Image (cartoon, rainbow, N blue to C red):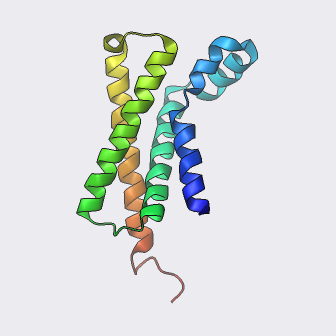
Amino acid sequence: MRTRIGLFLWLLGILFPLGWLRSYSGAYRRAFDALFGAEWLHILMHLALYAGLVILVLRVARRPADRKTFILVLVLTLGVGAIQEGLQIFSRGEWWLAVLPASLFDLGIDLLGTTLGFAAMVITRSPFFNLTE
């Protein structure tokens, strides 16, 4: 049950456009820009968010880490990423075509994070990684 709650909260964290709050508070804007202003950190956050999402989804679903599950997880995270990008665009009042290259880049990073999270689950579930025996 805790994993499902964690997955729900993780999804909320991904989907809620935190940048939107920048327009309402100068202090928040300064803190947000200081934390997430660097492009490398933006990329790292996308990787971590989507790798974590995959790990939580696989723990909740209890599916084998096979090719079919990988494709399903890719489709799921692509959908979540598209919704996230759409919410960000909507919250900033931007036109979709103006930010399409940046959004596609973010979706690519999201899918890379998905792949890294899936690989982490495959590695940690393998008998070679089982340190208890």
Tell which of 130 and 49 is nearer to you: 49
Question: Looking at the picture, how far across and down is residue 130, in whole percent?
Answer: 47, 80
Q: Write the residue at 67% across / 17% down.
A: 29
Q: Does residue 116 sit above or below 100 in this rendering?
A: below
Q: Does residue 113 sit above or below 29 in this rendering?
A: below
Q: Does residue 56 sit above or below 113 in this rendering?
A: below
In the image, farthest residue toward the right: 27
Relative horizontal placement of residue 24, taking residue 68 as reference (left or right): right
Tell which of 91 and 100 is nearer to you: 91
Tell which of 62 and 107 is nearer to you: 62
Question: Looking at the picture, how far across and down is residue 7, in whole percent?
Answer: 53, 52
Relative horizontal placement of residue 34, taking residue 80 as reference (left or right): right
Q: Does residue 103 sit above or below 74 in this rendering?
A: above
> What quarter of the picture does the N terminus occupy?
bottom right
Question: Looking at the picture, how far across and down is residue 100, in whole percent?
Answer: 32, 19
Relative horizontal placement of residue 58, taking residue 65 as reference (left or right): right
Q: Write the residue at 35% across / 51% down.
A: 115
In which quarter of the view is residue 124 placed? bottom left
Q: Write the residue at 34% across / 70% down.
A: 64
In the image, farthest residue toward the front: 1
Query: How many numbered callouts?
Result: 0
